[in-house]
Amino acid sequence: MKGQKQLARGGVIAGLLALAMAAPAAAATPPTRTVHYPTGFVMPAGQGCAFDVAGVPISGFVAVTHFSDTYEMRSVRIKGYYENLVTHKQFWVNDTWTEQDVWDPTTQLYTITGNGQIDVPFWPGDANPFGGITTDSTFYRFAGTTVNVVDFNGTPRTADFQWSGQITDICAALS
């Protein structure tokens, strides 16, 4: 009789453990992937350069894989150019990067870690790539790794920015 009670108790414990382990697995949702095909944009003066800039894609896509409310991966593959809408000077790009985006709901910080060829605008008040604070809008192209911490608690928009690799001033290239 004693052995049967121990066996039954062991079975109940094993069953409870199985239920406890199965509950999180059942609650987890599979990642979702969305693909977008860029159609272009105009960045008004002051939001990147001192002049209006058009982003003109020739081909490519942006794929976003959403894993949870706090984590997603983004793959960008776009060929095209930026155009100074005053002088019509063009700067051609082959944007190819992957980024990991992590949202921290407690601190309201969004950390974007990118690898590849990535273009980033900086607005007045943002932390800039050189360790200071941006006073005038700028627009840079990075070939390498970037870590951009965006603060949703207010200004600055970019609270911290780190990078390694090569940098190109897109505004200077379009001037």
Image (cartoon, rainbow, N blue to C red):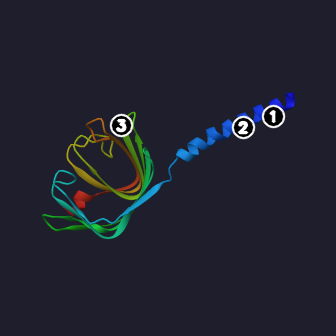
Q: Quarter holding the N terminus? A: top right
Amino acid type assigned to the residue bearing label 3 in the image: Gln
Return the residue at label 3: 108
Q: Which residue is mark 1?
A: 7
Farthest left residue in view: 86
**172 or 10: which is nearer to us?**
10
* Dots 2, 1 in contact, CB < 8 A: no
User: Under tag 2, what secondary structure?
Assistant: helix
Q: Give the amino acid type for the residue marked by disc 1 in the picture.
A: Leu
**Which secondary structure, mark 1?**
helix
Q: Are marks 3 and 2 in contact (CB under 8 Å)?
A: no
x, y percent for residue 121: 27, 52
Q: CA distance from mark 1 to mark 3?
A: 50 Å
Q: Which residue is denoted by mark 2 in the rendering? A: 14
Expressed as whole percent of the image width and height from the top left, the position of residue 71 reads 44, 47
Front-lying residue, 51 or 39: 39
Q: Residue furthest front?
A: 1
Q: Is residue 133 left or right of residue 68?
A: left
**Image vertical order of residue 158 relative to residue 100, above or below:** above
Which quadrant would residue 109 be assigned to in this image? top left
Earlier-in-chain disc, 2 versus 1: 1
x and y, in percent, of residue 124 in the image: 22, 43
